[in-house]
Image (spheres, rainbow, N blue to C red):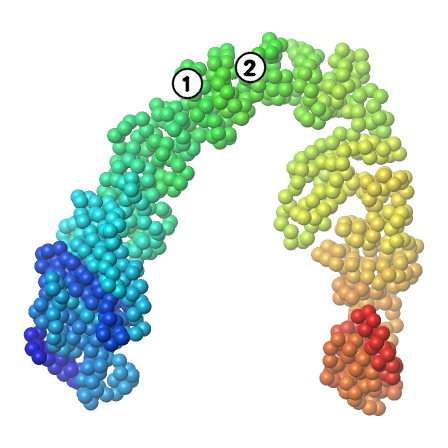
Amino acid sequence: MPDPFDTAGLRRRALAAWADSPARFREDANAEEDLVRGGYRDRLLVELAQNAADAAAQAGQPGRLRLELAGDGAGGELLRAANTGAPLDAGGVAGLATLRASAKRDGAGTVGRFGVGFAAVLAVTDAPVVHSTTGGVAFSAARTRQEVAAVPALAGELARREGAVPVLRLPWPAAGSPPEGFATEVVLPLRAGSRAAVRAALGELTAELLLALPGLAAVEVVVDGVVRTLAARERGDAVDLTDDGRTSTWRCARRSGELPAALLADRPVEERARRGFAVTWAVPLDDDGRPAPLPLPQQVHAPTPSDEPLTLPARLVAPFPLGPDRRHVLPGPVTDALVAEAADGYAALVAGLGPDPAVLALVPRVGLAGAPLDAALGTAVLDRLRSTAWLPVAGHPGARQAPGRAAALAEPSPERVAALVDAVPGLLPAGWSGRGDAPALAALGVRRVGTAEVVEAVRGLARPPAWWAALYAALDGADREELAALPVPLADGRTAHGPAGVLLPDPGLPVDRLAPLGLRLAEPGAVAPAAARRLLERLGARPATAAGVLADPAVRAAVAASLDAVDDAAADPGALAGAVLALVAAAGTEPGELPWLADLALPDAEGGWAPAGELVLPGSPLGAVLAPGALGTLDTGSPLVGDPAVLRAVGVLDGFALVTAEDPDDLDVDGAGEWADAVLDRLPPDAPPPVWPVLTAVRDLDLVADWRGAPALLAGLPAAAWADVDVGGVRVPGYLRWWLLTHPVLDGRRPGRLRHPAARELQGLYDVARAGDRLLDLLRPPASVADVLADVEGALDLLDRLGDPRRTVRPEVLAGVYARLAAALDGVDVDPPERVRVAPARVVPADDAVVLDVPWLHPLVDRPLVPAGGAPAAVADLLDLPPASEVVRAEVESTPVRRQPWAELPGAALAAARLGTDLPAGEVAVHAPLRAGGRPVGWWPGDGVDHVDGTPGALGRALAWRAGAWGRRQALAEAFAEPGRSDELAAEDAVCP
């Protein structure tokens, strides 16, 4: 067979090198394997297209590539890649058969740079073949393996590699020619495991590939006989990409030139001569010609896809230097220079797209970079975009400005932009300032003009009322706080520096009567439109009705200063009071609706003046229960005393008054701080700082002298006064209930230290609270131990009461009360009591008592025992008492008369059934008698052996303790006491499990 490319010589030299140095063989095999599994593992179609593009560039004509998946006639499949352009030559064959020695090094305009891309075919085939018009060449893993096996020096390495060889180092001549119209065809017999992947890759191939391979004009993809054509056609700055008849248009920006030789000084020798570069940016356009940014992240194409992420939503094709893995860009001066060129190209791309806000989607987002190169590109692109004049100017068609001179409304609308064109320079059109555009504009450094800045821009402008009306209408819906200083022209020629407090005249308002109050009335023409009036009202301006005037800050200030005006000779406190009372009457204000009215100075019965909130209506029930002189009484002879409802509305009292706040510190009532501390004591120790709800309290409780009459008045208060408060999910008594429970208001005693008449648990410990059912329901004195323990002070009081010999405790309460106290007071610094309760009616000095922590020591303890309620350690710690195990030191002294396993004891089967588990594996040692500490005891646990005196009670206790079921000891004792009745007892157990 003809061998036009001297493949025999190539094989001979390669085999000779391997035979002379087996390490060279190993190096070639490892290098090829690294390429196939690493840098080129998924690059088959890209590399075939790249080779086709380079062949076209060498021939100086547009290239065409045909990728066809076809059968091989033997049940397998072939991938055929036929391309036009320059045919295969001897240098090309040598490049294919040589690692990192490309024949394209001197080719201008070629894409391939490394001479290793053909290795990508080995991911799918073991026998690639290349047919060209100048001859053919074939590679074969099997034939290479055969040649290598014939070299004795390579046998060991071949065996270690399990037959794996470098396929592309030994070429053979191949017969055949490319299809008609093509210069070269690569034929790849596909391995069985790769066919599905190749078929999928062909289906996923898109025309976008041609953006990176300008030498290719078209790619034909043939699968199962169906042809799909991918094509590219350039039209100036646009490229039309066609995929099987569907065309999309991309806008491109290109920059090309030569890099200075000095920049390539540290690059490999074969790269230094390739100084030319071409950088391309491309972005698709929608049907309206607007940019349609690519989804993120993209990849940098260098020029074919790399693994470098790109968070710019466009396609970048640039000849960045790649590392050994062929997937990542190397840092250095070449990369820096190409980054700068790419940034210039991106700015040109954006500026050339036209004044459409969709272009803002192309602006890089700060902080999204996925890698150093991506970060460098984003930074450089932003720098160029910030210095390029490409943004439009509202109201000036055709004008362009750099981002640094531009301004964007934070809350734009066409009406606002139109109203502010002459007031805010550099303003962007409304469509360029949407919420979604904010990140892009911020990245560009565009000045964001908030509503507050707009307000500042219009301050001092002289405009007719109609202009102001249009501005107000455009600003309707803007942030209220930022509009606080919006100017409002007043009817008297002044300008109010903010709508708050401005009065919007109502036709029926007697303005002449309000002059002494210094009110501000808006210019009618500026507030005539409904939209203008609506905006100003939202910003604090009020209709000048009676209610509106009453809410004016000037009126409030006058009320606050009314008491001081009493001593001012030039002031008339009576006239001021009359005006305010008239406004209240006209507005129909309810009591408590405007708490600040309580500061209004009114005459008292002593001939002086006092705030309305510190005066009592003559003859009111409240005055009858307060201490004499605690509050003043309204002067009944004053002409100001009229409708009691109006007087109550300004704060004059005829009953207890409620106050509200959102924080206890703001409650100006007696004991508010102590109540807040009591609330916090009820929260879990690790609870975060509470978020307080709206709090309601009752004032003047500390001024009450008659606590027989006061409860009836308090019982009539609204439910909010008595309601519990939910703080952090914990319900606690509200201020009123807490204050009454902690003060001597029931026959001189605190209700919180009494018990509800129906409370059984607290009998003997607490005296009965005596009051009517309604008052008891409102006060809710403690009805259970849980009620007492909910409050730390209550728990401490209960601890003291337990040590009081004058009191008694119900047996069922005593059993667990100390354990419950220990849990309630956990984390609280408690002084141990001097006396402790050991029986319902027996109290002993604490120094005499112990806490039984292990039951078998009971017979050896000579001191009174405090019931531990299942928590002996906690109780001992609370009471500062020793546990029995520290007081008694003893061990078994007697010798057992017999030993036997638990399972062999009479009654063991029933005991196991009552435990619900198998009996312990240990033994029982029976003593007659059992002695420990010099005394007879019933049972004593040991290491794997339980000592008992043989009685059923001892057996039941020992087994219950061993099994962790102490509460079932009596049931177990019964099982051992009557083994003959096991079946009968088991039947009873089954009646009610």
The residue that mark 1 highlights is 467
Q: Position of residue 449 (x, y in %)?
A: 40, 32
Tag 2: residue type? Answer: Pro
User: What SS does tag 2 mark?
Assistant: loop
Q: In the image, is 380 to the left or to the right of 781?
A: left
Residue at left offset 24%, top offset 63%? 225
State which quadrant residue 609 falls in: top right
Q: Distance between the residues labelled 1 and 2?
A: 19 Å
Q: Where is residue 803 in the image (x, y as percent from the top left)?
A: 87, 57
User: What SS does tag 1 mark?
Assistant: helix
Q: Where is residue 893 in the image (x, y as percent from the top left)?
A: 83, 85
The residue that mark 2 highlights is 505
Q: In the image, is 369 to the left or to the right of 985?
A: left
Tag 1: residue type? Answer: Trp
Residue at left offset 47%, top offset 30%? 478
- Residue toward you, 272 or 900: 900
Q: In the image, is 438 to the left or to the right of 18?
A: right
Q: In which quarter of the image is the C terminus?
A: bottom right
Q: In this view, does 485 lie above or below 864?
A: above
Q: Is residue 892 visible in the rendered structure shown here?
A: no
Residue at left offset 16%, top offset 49%? 256
State which quadrant residue 96 falls in: bottom left
Number of numbered markers: 2
- Residue toward you, 849 or 525: 525
Mark 2 or mark 1, which is nearer the start of the sequence?
A: 1
